[in-house]
Amino acid sequence: MGKDRFGVPSSRGSLLKPSSETHGAARRAAGIARKNLYGRGSPRALRPRERALLKELLPTLSVPGPLEAGALDPFSLFPSSVRSVSLEIGFGAGERFLEAARARPQTGFIGCEFYRKGIARTLSAFAAAPMANIRLYEGAGEEILDSLRDASLSEIAVLFPDPWPKRRHRRRRFSQAASLRSAARALADGGLLWIATDSPIFSAWTLMQAERVGSLFWTAARAEDWRRSPYPGVQTRYGRKAARGGRGVTHLLFRRAARADFL
Ligand SMILES: C[S@@+](CC[C@H](N)C(=O)[O-])C[C@H]1O[C@@H](n2cnc3c(N)ncnc32)[C@H](O)[C@@H]1O
């Protein structure tokens, strides 16, 4: 099998249509508001190799557009050996995302991020050790959640989302009840939503929002349940920052209730 200039087997290119150009149009066409994309106003400069990865490698891994509400079957993005699909929203530099995908080859991993430097770093690590079970979406988590079929994911990870601790900025937080409802819709019965944060304000607020979503149940029974990562292993950049700063991390783990219980 041939390899492209990044060392990635070239047959990957035929798996998926290049799509990064179509996403902008898809978002506008779908009328999806990009209301939560705050805080990355002055992006860090990209190196030439990072620019090349974004231009050439990203389209071969991207979720093909245009996105339509509730239409995307995530299994269609992966080889048939994939048995379940996981979504990570805001993967940053992709440390945990790639590590999890490598450890679980029978799970398809969709990563969503709009921070270009982070996507480029993820692509660089991917190019050094490619695998067949990852796909990327450059854009907002709310958009990819809206596009997924009902009950199509087994888990969703949102690690250290921007906490927006000031009250006047709370509408910018990812864990609005509307987004949690959207996550619950995309999760299969029994599926898990994992939100990690080092902000007590954010975790308390997220619990209040989740209470408004009837189909998500917080799994914690005792304090050690939220102090422990459900998937201990590689740290993300913000996880390391929290540890260095001596801040405790809260792991909020919600389970999607069985749909039959709501009939
Ligand atoms: C504080 S960083 C955490 C990054 C990484 N998860 C970590 O633990 O190191 C939050 C990340 O979420 C991304 N982000 C913020 N809002 C988002 C949204 N609505 N959809 C997707 N990504 C988002 C940001 O670009 C940023 O990279």
Image: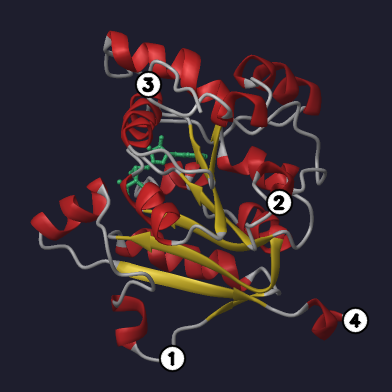
- The tag on residue 221 is 1
Q: Tell me the CA gap for discs 2 and 4.
A: 27 Å
Q: Residue at x 63, y 14 (%)?
A: 21
Q: Residues within 10 Å of mark 3 (few under 14, many from 20)?
A: some
Where does label 2 land, which residue?
A: 75
Q: Amino acid at mark 2?
A: Phe
Q: Residues within 10 Å of mark 4 (few under 14, many from 20)?
A: few
Mark before the other along the chain sequence, 2 or 3: 3
Q: Residue at x 34, y 50 (%)?
A: 165
Q: Amino acid at mark 4?
A: Leu
Q: Residues within 10 Å of mark 1 (few under 14, many from 20)?
A: few
Above or below residue 247? Residue 218 is: below
Assign ligand 1 to one image quadrant: top left
Q: Tell me the CA gap for discs 2 and 1.
A: 33 Å
Q: Residues within 10 Å of mark 2 (few under 14, many from 20)?
A: some
Q: Tell me the CA gap for discs 3 and 4.
A: 51 Å
Q: Residue extending furthest front?
A: 1
Q: Tell me the CA gap for discs 3 and 1.
A: 47 Å
Q: Secondary structure at mark 1?
A: loop
Residue 211 point in image, percent of width and height: 60, 73
Q: Secondary structure at mark 4?
A: loop
Where does label 4 land, which residue?
A: 263
Q: Is residue 163 visible?
A: no
25 vs 245, nearest the viewer: 25
Residue 94 point in image, percent of width and height: 36, 42
Mark before the other along the chain sequence, 2 or 4: 2
Q: Residue at x 39, y 65 (%)?
A: 203
Q: Tell me the CA gap for discs 4 and 1.
A: 27 Å
Q: Amino acid at mark 1?
A: Ala
83 vs 258, nearest the viewer: 83
